[in-house]
Image (spheres, rainbow, N blue to C red):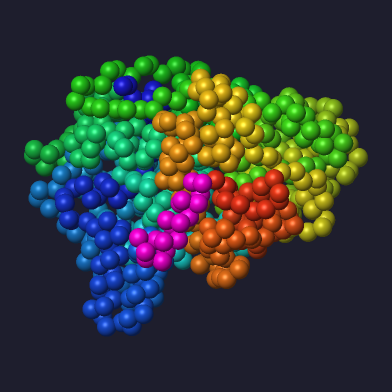
Amino acid sequence: MNLPRELVEAVRRHQVVPFVGAGVSMGVKRGLFPSWKQLLEGLAERLEQEALPEPVVAEVRKCIAGGDFLTAAELGFKEMGAFRFNRFLRERLRVHRPADAELSVVRALWGLRPEVMLTTNYDDVLLWGQEGAEPISNDQDDELHLMDAEASPDAPRLWYLHGTIHRLSTLILGGADYARLYGDGTQQHGRYSHYTNALVRLREWIRARPFLYVGFSFSDPYVLKQIEHVLGITKGRHVPSFALMKKGSIERGALWPRYNIQLIEYEDHGPPLAACLNALSRAAFGEPSAPPGMVRPATGIPAPASAPINRVPAVGPATASDASAPELFTFRSGAPRASPAQPAPAAPPQPASVSLESAPIPLDPPHVPREALEQVYAHILRHRHRLVLFAPEDGGAESIARRVARQYGERVSWLEPPNVPDCTEADYCRALAEDNRVTSFDALVEYLRQRAEGLGREHLFVLRYEWGPLGHLDTLGKHLRRLMEAPSKVELHLLVAGGGARGGWLLHNVSKSSVFSDAVKREVPDFTVDEVWQLLDAADLDGKRWARDVHEATGGHPGLLEEILAGAGALDRKSVTERLARSPWVRGALQERLREDERNGASGKRSCRFVLEELLAGRPVNALEPLDYHLEQPEVRLYFSGLVRGDEEGRTVPRCRAVELAARDELARKDGRS
């Protein structure tokens, strides 16, 4: 099957950003580099050799057995101390290039001629195949600022997102280090100043360019934790990213709905992966010529510089208010498209030796219109002026907000606060207005007023809230109230798409003077059996036969329905349940809730673990409705993660059977029983 046209065009334009995981390093020579689990098992052995307390070693081993590798690494660091811990890492990861290293995949990656390559690895493997690539770490502010202007296919940058083994102070390994870079979405202003520039830069690149994930196992709990935030902030983008993975590694539908990543499968690691990458290079550039600095495998002599390639400006992703985007029910658009201004040529057929099993993704996925619900929300806005929509993560709040906004035509302003710790007022307001001249909240209010009055009649502000500095959000709420209550030529309305836990936080943590404090709130309901029937019929999947099974297996959750439609397989209740119980969507949500409780010290009845154990034992827990979205309640945190719901009698129950199966397995892993 041909490679995705969007990916080929991105490579040709030098816009694609390879994002390289541990699988590439482990493939250069068997046993040269450990897996994350092997690395930490070696750490536990070293703890024993250093005669450290047996309970500490036992706790580290328990964390490893339970898949909580971040905590295991952090415990090891605390007990061994920086000197001994860093010496251990150097022994395992700081190695010289062996004479028999298999570098075909590394050379093929550089053969894509990227301007920048990202990696979560710490080692030198990617530099072994490209002399002259400049390594950059997160604490190098100047180099990160210059990367856009100076990086090129002839002078590429290798961005060590989690640090390099040559500069141990840069390593992101334990949970606290991870929080320094990514945060958890609720941290106070000023806490992560050392990594703010890196986070800002990362978000800008993810918005503007497609990523190509290579060497990741999306079913590995540690890898999921490492990249969850990176992938999470791609949600809502219209330009897809891509993942090259060994055939059978993951369910086809697991990446596309949640992360906007199209899966491209190959037969095996090593030469087949290299062949796949080389086929991509040929599709983009024709016959390969080694990039400058790349070492030829036969001679070891750097290849001469090739003729410069004309660089074509990137075509940016469609904006949230793009009227040309297809109308979907909860599906985020993102299927590969050619630029309207310059259609991409079709990729040439692949050589017979390359097996590419790209999942066919329709340009316009089937959707179910929810006109009655949309009309109710539009009526509230026109009479009460402010509305906050609540839903579990991927539960449809943002999608239905888009469809309500369509009723306003061009009279819509989308407000997307940057989810960046330590963001200044100027940066925050510039991002909201998408105008570099708007550098204060007063200027933002004037900008929004002029825009609304210029378009006339009524005007809708839609806030797509994705965390970010909490002080700025409260200030934004106060200024929006001032704007909406001031005399105006137009009637102003505000719709907040507060999907996930951020909606609950918004409701209870802003000041009374904020525009959000007394807004009308509504919960986006799950899909009914009839709506699932319509959805399956629209996808030619026999809704009459399978709607009830699929509804029961997903609990009517839009995100789980989306994952099933994007994948492949039988639609009976048992088959759907088994696929969802193994999916990164369900597993990742469970793991994050359990780890979050450990980080925050939540225990006993305040922990998600307690609620899950009670539900699995058939015992009742707190009903959701009286809890009123308070995030200190574990039932609410599980609800916003899509793992529990309220039934017809108001009781809190597991979302579906798949959640029960996955929860039993995760709790057993945490206890070291599997």
If the image is split into quadrants, where does the C terminus sit?
Answer: bottom left
| Of the pair 78 and 523, the residue shown nearer to us | 523
| Of the pair 407 and 442, the residue shown nearer to us | 407
Give the left or right position of residue 56, taking residue 487 as reference: left
Q: Can you give x and y, in whole percent of width and height, for residue 304 in the image? A: 18, 34
Q: Residue at x 27, y 33 (%)?
A: 266
Is the residue 6 above or below the residue 392 in the image? Answer: above
Q: Residue at x 57, y 58 (%)?
A: 618
| Of the pair 79 and 344, the residue shown nearer to us | 79
Is the residue 384 above or below the residue 638 in the image? Answer: above
Is the residue 394 above or below the residue 339 in the image? Answer: below
Task: Decide whether residue 660 is among the magenta residues.
Answer: yes
Q: Residue at x 21, y 47 (%)?
A: 27
In the rendered image, which quarter is residue 579 located in? Answer: top left
Q: Residue at x 27, y 83 (%)?
A: 51
Q: Can you give x and y, in whole percent of width and height, for residue 592 in the image? A: 50, 56
Camera sees residue 82: no
In the rendered image, which quarter is residue 83 located in? Answer: bottom left
The mark tally for this picture is 0
Query: What's the magenta region?
Result: 657-674
Camera sees residue 219: yes
Q: Can you give x and y, in whole percent of width and height, for residue 174 in the image? A: 41, 65
Task: Pick out the residue farthest to the right.
Answer: 487
Magenta stretch, main secondary structure class: helix
Task: Pick out the residue farthest to the front.
Answer: 618
Give the left or right position of residue 536, taking residue 65 as reference: right
If the image is split into quadrants, where does the N terminus sit?
Answer: top left
| Of the pair 396 and 82, the residue shown nearer to us | 396
Q: Can you give x and y, in whole percent of width and height, for residue 588 in the image? A: 47, 51
Give the left or right position of residue 171, taking residue 484 as reference: left
Task: Decide whether residue 327 is among the magenta residues.
Answer: no
